[in-house]
Image (cartoon, rainbow, N blue to C red):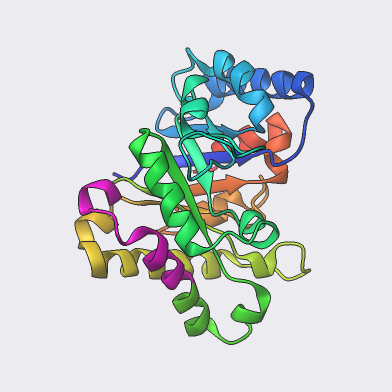
Amino acid sequence: MRNKIVAGNWKMNKTLEEGKILASEVVNMAADEAPSDVTVIMGTPAIHMDAVGKLVKDAANVAIAAQDCSAHEAGAYTGEISVSQIKSVGAEYVILGHSERREYHNESNELLAAKVDTALAADLKPIFCCGEALETREQGDDVAYKFVCDQLTASLFHLSAEVMTNFIIAYEPIWAIGTGKTASAEQAQLMHAEIRKHIAAKYGQEVADSVSILYGGSCKPSNANEIFAGADVDGGLIGGASLASRDFIDIVKSF
Protein backbone atom coordinates (compact mmCIF):
# COMPACT_ATOMS: atom_id res chain seq x y z
CA MET A 1 0.00 0.00 0.00
CA ARG A 2 1.38 3.38 -1.00
CA ASN A 3 1.16 6.22 1.47
CA LYS A 4 -1.72 8.61 0.91
CA ILE A 5 -0.51 12.17 1.46
CA VAL A 6 -2.03 15.63 1.33
CA ALA A 7 0.63 18.30 1.75
CA GLY A 8 -0.10 22.01 1.95
CA ASN A 9 2.36 24.55 0.59
CA TRP A 10 1.66 27.89 2.25
CA LYS A 11 4.30 29.60 0.08
CA MET A 12 4.97 33.21 1.23
CA ASN A 13 1.71 33.67 3.09
CA LYS A 14 0.50 34.16 6.68
CA THR A 15 2.06 36.15 9.49
CA LEU A 16 3.32 34.13 12.44
CA GLU A 17 0.09 34.62 14.40
CA GLU A 18 -2.07 33.84 11.36
CA GLY A 19 -0.03 30.73 10.72
CA LYS A 20 -0.42 29.50 14.28
CA ILE A 21 -4.18 29.91 14.03
CA LEU A 22 -4.33 28.06 10.70
CA ALA A 23 -2.09 25.25 11.94
CA SER A 24 -4.12 24.84 15.12
CA GLU A 25 -7.33 24.59 13.08
CA VAL A 26 -5.79 21.99 10.78
CA VAL A 27 -4.50 19.90 13.69
CA ASN A 28 -7.88 19.93 15.45
CA MET A 29 -9.89 19.22 12.29
CA ALA A 30 -7.50 16.45 11.25
CA ALA A 31 -7.90 14.78 14.63
CA ASP A 32 -11.68 14.78 14.24
CA GLU A 33 -12.11 14.21 10.51
CA ALA A 34 -9.01 13.04 8.66
CA PRO A 35 -8.89 9.38 7.58
CA SER A 36 -6.34 7.50 9.66
CA ASP A 37 -4.47 6.31 6.56
CA VAL A 38 -3.81 9.82 5.19
CA THR A 39 -0.71 11.77 6.20
CA VAL A 40 -1.39 15.51 6.49
CA ILE A 41 1.60 17.83 5.97
CA MET A 42 1.84 21.60 6.31
CA GLY A 43 4.65 23.22 4.30
CA THR A 44 5.14 26.46 6.19
CA PRO A 45 7.45 29.46 5.77
CA ALA A 46 10.65 29.09 7.79
CA ILE A 47 9.58 31.55 10.50
CA HIS A 48 6.53 29.38 11.29
CA MET A 49 8.21 26.02 11.62
CA ASP A 50 9.15 26.17 15.29
CA ALA A 51 5.68 27.28 16.44
CA VAL A 52 3.83 24.90 14.10
CA GLY A 53 6.20 22.09 15.02
CA LYS A 54 5.10 22.41 18.63
CA LEU A 55 1.44 22.30 17.57
CA VAL A 56 1.84 19.09 15.55
CA LYS A 57 4.22 17.35 17.95
CA ASP A 58 1.57 15.10 19.48
CA ALA A 59 -0.70 14.87 16.41
CA ALA A 60 -0.97 11.31 15.13
CA ASN A 61 -1.15 12.03 11.42
CA VAL A 62 0.01 15.65 10.96
CA ALA A 63 3.57 16.76 10.18
CA ILE A 64 5.40 19.82 8.89
CA ALA A 65 7.65 20.44 5.91
CA ALA A 66 10.13 23.12 5.02
CA GLN A 67 9.56 24.73 1.64
CA ASP A 68 13.21 24.39 0.65
CA CYS A 69 16.65 23.68 2.07
CA SER A 70 20.23 24.55 1.22
CA ALA A 71 22.50 22.02 -0.43
CA HIS A 72 25.10 23.10 2.16
CA GLU A 73 25.06 21.81 5.71
CA ALA A 74 26.13 25.13 7.31
CA GLY A 75 28.18 28.24 6.62
CA ALA A 76 28.14 31.69 5.08
CA TYR A 77 24.98 31.37 3.01
CA THR A 78 22.86 34.37 3.98
CA GLY A 79 19.12 33.79 3.79
CA GLU A 80 19.37 30.03 3.36
CA ILE A 81 18.09 27.36 5.76
CA SER A 82 20.01 24.19 6.55
CA VAL A 83 18.72 20.68 7.04
CA SER A 84 19.93 20.65 10.65
CA GLN A 85 17.94 23.84 11.32
CA ILE A 86 14.87 22.24 9.76
CA LYS A 87 15.28 19.08 11.81
CA SER A 88 15.77 21.06 15.01
CA VAL A 89 12.17 22.33 14.93
CA GLY A 90 10.66 18.89 14.41
CA ALA A 91 10.06 18.96 10.66
CA GLU A 92 10.08 15.60 8.90
CA TYR A 93 9.75 16.71 5.28
CA VAL A 94 11.17 19.24 2.83
CA ILE A 95 9.69 20.37 -0.49
CA LEU A 96 12.38 20.41 -3.18
CA GLY A 97 12.33 21.47 -6.83
CA HIS A 98 9.07 23.41 -6.71
CA SER A 99 8.40 25.10 -10.04
CA GLU A 100 8.68 28.54 -8.44
CA ARG A 101 12.13 27.69 -7.08
CA ARG A 102 13.17 26.38 -10.48
CA GLU A 103 11.87 29.48 -12.29
CA TYR A 104 12.58 32.35 -9.89
CA HIS A 105 15.82 31.02 -8.39
CA ASN A 106 17.14 29.17 -11.44
CA GLU A 107 17.45 25.88 -9.59
CA SER A 108 18.95 23.25 -11.88
CA ASN A 109 18.46 19.50 -11.87
CA GLU A 110 22.05 19.14 -10.65
CA LEU A 111 21.52 21.51 -7.70
CA LEU A 112 18.34 19.67 -6.79
CA ALA A 113 20.19 16.35 -6.81
CA ALA A 114 22.60 17.83 -4.28
CA LYS A 115 19.72 19.13 -2.15
CA VAL A 116 18.05 15.71 -2.22
CA ASP A 117 21.28 14.11 -0.99
CA THR A 118 21.72 16.68 1.78
CA ALA A 119 18.12 16.22 2.94
CA LEU A 120 18.33 12.44 2.93
CA ALA A 121 21.63 12.48 4.85
CA ALA A 122 19.79 14.41 7.59
CA ASP A 123 16.91 11.92 7.56
CA LEU A 124 14.51 14.45 6.04
CA LYS A 125 11.97 13.12 3.56
CA PRO A 126 11.97 15.07 0.29
CA ILE A 127 8.76 15.90 -1.52
CA PHE A 128 10.36 16.20 -4.94
CA CYS A 129 8.53 18.37 -7.49
CA CYS A 130 8.61 17.97 -11.25
CA GLY A 131 6.51 19.36 -14.08
CA GLU A 132 6.41 20.99 -17.48
CA ALA A 133 5.59 24.51 -18.67
CA LEU A 134 3.02 25.44 -21.31
CA GLU A 135 5.48 25.59 -24.22
CA THR A 136 6.57 22.03 -23.46
CA ARG A 137 3.03 20.68 -23.06
CA GLU A 138 1.99 22.27 -26.37
CA GLN A 139 4.62 20.20 -28.17
CA GLY A 140 2.59 17.11 -27.36
CA ASP A 141 2.07 14.58 -24.59
CA ASP A 142 5.14 12.51 -25.45
CA VAL A 143 7.40 15.58 -25.25
CA ALA A 144 5.86 16.51 -21.91
CA TYR A 145 6.29 12.99 -20.54
CA LYS A 146 9.94 12.91 -21.59
CA PHE A 147 10.63 16.33 -20.09
CA VAL A 148 9.26 15.34 -16.69
CA CYS A 149 10.96 11.94 -16.72
CA ASP A 150 14.26 13.59 -17.63
CA GLN A 151 13.92 15.81 -14.55
CA LEU A 152 13.54 12.71 -12.40
CA THR A 153 16.47 10.95 -14.07
CA ALA A 154 18.78 13.93 -13.57
CA SER A 155 17.91 14.59 -9.92
CA LEU A 156 16.89 11.24 -8.45
CA PHE A 157 18.21 8.29 -10.42
CA HIS A 158 21.59 8.30 -8.68
CA LEU A 159 19.74 7.09 -5.57
CA SER A 160 19.63 3.44 -4.55
CA ALA A 161 16.50 1.33 -4.85
CA GLU A 162 16.33 1.21 -1.06
CA VAL A 163 16.25 5.03 -0.84
CA MET A 164 13.71 5.32 -3.66
CA THR A 165 11.34 2.94 -1.86
CA ASN A 166 8.50 5.00 -0.36
CA PHE A 167 9.88 8.19 -1.97
CA ILE A 168 7.48 11.11 -2.54
CA ILE A 169 7.15 12.90 -5.89
CA ALA A 170 4.80 15.79 -6.67
CA TYR A 171 3.80 16.42 -10.29
CA GLU A 172 3.06 20.07 -11.10
CA PRO A 173 1.30 20.78 -14.42
CA ILE A 174 2.85 24.24 -14.62
CA TRP A 175 1.05 24.80 -17.92
CA ALA A 176 -2.30 24.69 -16.13
CA ILE A 177 -1.43 26.96 -13.20
CA GLY A 178 -2.39 30.60 -13.73
CA THR A 179 -2.62 30.22 -17.51
CA GLY A 180 -6.38 29.86 -17.89
CA LYS A 181 -5.89 26.29 -19.09
CA THR A 182 -7.13 23.31 -17.10
CA ALA A 183 -5.54 19.93 -16.48
CA SER A 184 -8.16 17.19 -16.38
CA ALA A 185 -8.17 14.30 -13.93
CA GLU A 186 -7.39 12.04 -16.90
CA GLN A 187 -4.34 14.11 -17.86
CA ALA A 188 -3.13 14.00 -14.25
CA GLN A 189 -3.49 10.22 -14.12
CA LEU A 190 -1.71 9.75 -17.45
CA MET A 191 1.32 11.75 -16.31
CA HIS A 192 1.41 9.99 -12.94
CA ALA A 193 1.32 6.64 -14.75
CA GLU A 194 4.21 7.71 -16.99
CA ILE A 195 6.24 8.75 -13.94
CA ARG A 196 5.61 5.41 -12.26
CA LYS A 197 6.51 3.53 -15.45
CA HIS A 198 9.75 5.50 -15.71
CA ILE A 199 10.67 4.63 -12.12
CA ALA A 200 9.82 0.98 -12.74
CA ALA A 201 12.14 0.87 -15.76
CA LYS A 202 15.03 1.95 -13.53
CA TYR A 203 14.23 0.35 -10.17
CA GLY A 204 11.64 -2.35 -10.85
CA GLN A 205 7.89 -2.44 -10.39
CA GLU A 206 7.97 -3.15 -6.66
CA VAL A 207 9.88 0.05 -5.92
CA ALA A 208 7.76 2.04 -8.38
CA ASP A 209 4.59 0.81 -6.72
CA SER A 210 5.83 2.07 -3.34
CA VAL A 211 6.41 5.66 -4.52
CA SER A 212 3.72 8.18 -3.58
CA ILE A 213 3.01 10.53 -6.49
CA LEU A 214 1.09 13.66 -5.54
CA TYR A 215 -0.81 15.97 -7.87
CA GLY A 216 0.42 19.56 -7.59
CA GLY A 217 -2.03 21.34 -9.86
CA SER A 218 -5.08 23.38 -8.96
CA CYS A 219 -6.63 20.95 -6.50
CA LYS A 220 -9.60 22.05 -4.40
CA PRO A 221 -12.52 20.41 -2.58
CA SER A 222 -14.66 20.47 -5.71
CA ASN A 223 -12.26 18.41 -7.86
CA ALA A 224 -10.06 16.52 -5.37
CA ASN A 225 -12.23 13.40 -5.31
CA GLU A 226 -12.08 13.02 -9.09
CA ILE A 227 -8.33 13.65 -9.22
CA PHE A 228 -7.53 11.30 -6.32
CA ALA A 229 -9.55 8.55 -8.00
CA GLY A 230 -6.70 8.09 -10.50
CA ALA A 231 -4.97 4.75 -10.01
CA ASP A 232 -1.55 6.38 -9.80
CA VAL A 233 -2.56 9.53 -7.88
CA ASP A 234 -1.69 9.20 -4.21
CA GLY A 235 -2.69 12.63 -2.96
CA GLY A 236 -1.92 16.26 -3.56
CA LEU A 237 0.51 19.10 -3.00
CA ILE A 238 -1.97 21.88 -2.31
CA GLY A 239 -1.30 25.59 -2.77
CA GLY A 240 -4.04 28.17 -2.29
CA ALA A 241 -6.58 25.78 -0.75
CA SER A 242 -4.12 24.92 2.04
CA LEU A 243 -4.49 28.46 3.40
CA ALA A 244 -8.09 27.77 4.45
CA SER A 245 -8.39 25.00 7.04
CA ARG A 246 -11.88 23.91 5.97
CA ASP A 247 -10.91 23.59 2.31
CA PHE A 248 -7.68 21.83 3.17
CA ILE A 249 -9.30 19.22 5.40
CA ASP A 250 -12.09 18.66 2.88
CA ILE A 251 -9.35 17.79 0.36
CA VAL A 252 -7.78 15.43 2.92
CA LYS A 253 -11.14 13.67 3.14
CA SER A 254 -11.45 13.28 -0.65
CA PHE A 255 -9.91 9.80 -1.03
Q: For the view shown, which residue lies furthest in the front direction?
A: 76
Q: Kindly indicate the quadrant of the structure image that contains residue 149.
A: bottom left
Q: Kindly indicate the quadrant of the structure image that contains residue 78.
A: top right
Q: How many discs appear?
A: 0
Residue shown at 63%/54% (left/top)?
101
**Residue 30 is covered by the magenta coloring:** no
Q: Kindly tell me whether residue 138 is visible in this rendering.
A: yes
Of 144 and 234, nearer the camera is 144
Q: Kindly tell me whether residue 234 is visible in this rendering.
A: no
- Give the image location of residue 70, x and y in percent: 53, 42
Residue shown at 28%/58% (left/top)?
208
- Give the image location of residue 33, x and y in percent: 55, 25
Above-or-below relation of 126 to 245: below
- Give the image location of residue 83, x and y in percent: 47, 33
Of 196 and 70, nearer the camera is 70
Of 75 and 212, nearer the camera is 75
Is residue 218 rendered to the left or right of residue 88?
Answer: right
**Residue 163 is covered by the magenta coloring:** yes
- The residues colored magenta run 148-165
Of 162 and 237, nearer the camera is 162
Quarter of the image containing the N terminus?
top left
Main secondary structure found in the magenta portion = helix
- Give the image location of residue 244, x and y in percent: 73, 33
Is residue 232 rendered to the left or right of residue 98?
Answer: left
Residue shown at 48%/20% (left/top)?
88
